[in-house]
């Protein structure tokens, strides 16, 4: 069994994300912690809190080299966090005189939480264009299939006709919501953390607030009071990532059902072979998206369970965040990658879609009851009449004509093409909600 699906060489082609992994792996983790220490020295030197020369030496001395992550293992085992070992290594790299000013007034949580926000910011910069590209593709596919009728299904049963374009628009709908919320997410969640040992900057009072202000600008993060026991930023990121994965799982689930051998209304992706059954083309990409959603779902639950740290720091909850948030970014990134491949390769079977509608004329039963009601038949009576027509052995339109007390051209009234314009309008309303691309 792999230690992680996301880093396994065996499973890399299916689950790994080569763009996100370098941000989230050990080297990426150390790199972002070092970035915090550089920025802290720069702003403290600028504010005259540490010597300007020491600040320059720290910034330059830490620019091109990083401690080997493996070298921090022993220190992490001792302290429970890698920061003490990291700071000791960085002080040697900066030199004895400048090194004593490194990490001035900071604590381990300042380093790790801010590094996690920097990593999250970098990950969002990768996910954002993927998300918007997928929405663009879905909009194109929706427009291309705006007139292709489809037997809508509610609770797995044929209900009323819709269009394939409308179903595709609904796949895009929650993704559009997530894209619209991305700017607010960045503004609320990507916060600098600088509070010192217990969160109140007591060691460097009264300079803590000024340092935090400058640090936020230097790192392009949001300024905030210390949030060391307020895990709202992580929960907000987690919830957004879960929404992405849920939306993609909905799309994937529909594609799995629509591509079943006995339904075969819509094919997608490249398929996957069976080890023993050469006739099969398994929905590997769609299935993988659903797996990734479950990984994200359970990771989100673990993050929520870690959101109630004891007192001013809780070593029993904190490591859960280090483990689970990266899994959620990787799950969302990989799911978006697979979803794009599926959207690029949608192949509707128009003949099959039309045949399902033709063999289920009762899909227009709701329309029939409203036509009767508009003709003056009480709603309850109209519904009963349509129910009788559905159970009649005669063709649906003929049964309605025989049972109806009013003269109605049922062939025209029951034309499924009538749903195309409402579906087009609703699809248009969905895509019109986009506020950014």
Image (tube, grey):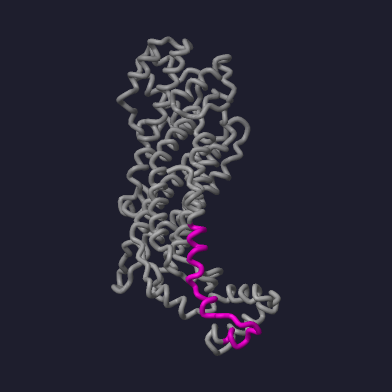
The front one of 110 and 410 is: 410
At x 70%, y 76%, the residue is 378
Give the answer, above or below, for where 101 lies relative to 262.
above
Q: Quadrant of residue 375?
A: bottom right
Q: Residue furthest left?
A: 278
Q: Quadrant of residue 272?
A: bottom left
Per the image, is 163 magenta? no
Q: Position of 388 compared to 1: left or right?
A: right
At x 35%, y 17%, the residue is 94
Residue 162 picture location, percent across and down: 49, 67
Give the answer, above or below, for where 192 lies relative to 434.
above
Residue 344 picture location, percent across and down: 34, 57
Residue 381 picture location, percent across and down: 69, 79
- The region drawn magenta spans 399-427
Q: Quadrant of residue 303?
A: top right
Per the image, is 414 magenta? yes
- Total marks placed: 0
Residue 273 picture location, percent across and down: 30, 67
The front one of 132 and 373 is: 373
At x 45%, y 58%, the residue is 290
Q: Is residue 78 visible?
A: no
The front one of 231 and 167 is: 167
At x 50%, y 22%, the residue is 106
The main secondary structure of the magenta stretch is helix
Q: Position of 10 compared to 308: left or right?
A: left
Q: Quadrant of the C terminus?
A: top left
């Amino acid at each position: 069994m792999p230690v992680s699906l996301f880093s396994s060489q065996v499973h890399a082609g299916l689950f790994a994300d080569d763009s996100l992994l370098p941000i989230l792996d050990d080297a990426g983790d150390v790199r972002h912690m070092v970035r915090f220490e550089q920025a802290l020295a720069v702003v403290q030197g600028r504010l005259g809190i540490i010597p300007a020369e020491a600040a320059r030496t720290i910034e330059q001395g830490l620019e091109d080299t990083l401690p080997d992550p493996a070298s921090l293992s022993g220190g992490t085992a001792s302290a429970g966090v890698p920061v003490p070992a990291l700071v000791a290594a960085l002080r040697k790299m900066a030199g004895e005189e400048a090194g004593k000013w490194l990490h001035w007034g900071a604590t381990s949580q300042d380093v790790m939480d801010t590094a996690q926000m920097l990593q999250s910011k970098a990950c969002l910069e990768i996910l954002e264009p993927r998300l918007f590209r997928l929405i663009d593709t879905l909009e194109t596919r929706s427009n291309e299939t705006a007139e292709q009728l489809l037997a809508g299904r509610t609770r797995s049963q044929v209900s009323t006709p819709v269009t394939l374009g409308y179903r595709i628009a609904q796949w895009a709908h929650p993704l559009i919501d997530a894209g619209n919320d991305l700017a607010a997410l960045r503004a609320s969640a990507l916060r600098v953390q600088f509070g010192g040992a217990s969160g109140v900057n007591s060691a460097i009072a009264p300079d803590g607030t000024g340092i935090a202000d400058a640090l936020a600008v230097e790192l392009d993060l949001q300024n905030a009071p210390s949030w060391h026991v307020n895990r709202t930023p992580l929960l907000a990121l987690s919830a957004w990532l879960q929404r992405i994965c849920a939306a993609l799982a909905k799309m994937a689930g529909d594609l799995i059902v629509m591509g079943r051998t006995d339904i075969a209304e819509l094919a997608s992706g490249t398929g996957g072979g069976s080890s023993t059954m050469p006739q099969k083309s398994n929905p590997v990409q769609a299935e993988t998206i659903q797996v990734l959603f479950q990984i994200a779902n359970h990771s989100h639950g673990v993050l929520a369970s870690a959101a109630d740290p004891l007192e001013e720091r809780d070593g029993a909850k904190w490591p859960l965040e280090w483990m689970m948030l990266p899994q959620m970014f990787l799950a969302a990134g990989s799911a978006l990658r697979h979803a794009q491949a599926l959207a690029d390769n949608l192949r509707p079977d128009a003949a099959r879609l039309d045949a399902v509608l033709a063999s289920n004329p009762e899909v227009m039963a709701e329309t029939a009851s409203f036509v009767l009601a508009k003709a003056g038949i009480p709603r309850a009576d109209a519904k009963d009449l349509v129910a009788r027509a559905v159970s009649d052995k005669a063709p649906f339109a003929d049964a309605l004509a025989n049972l109806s007390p009013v003269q109605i051209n049922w062939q025209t009234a029951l034309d499924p093409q009538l749903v195309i314009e409402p579906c087009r309008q609703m699809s248009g309303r969905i895509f019109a909600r986009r506020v950014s691309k």
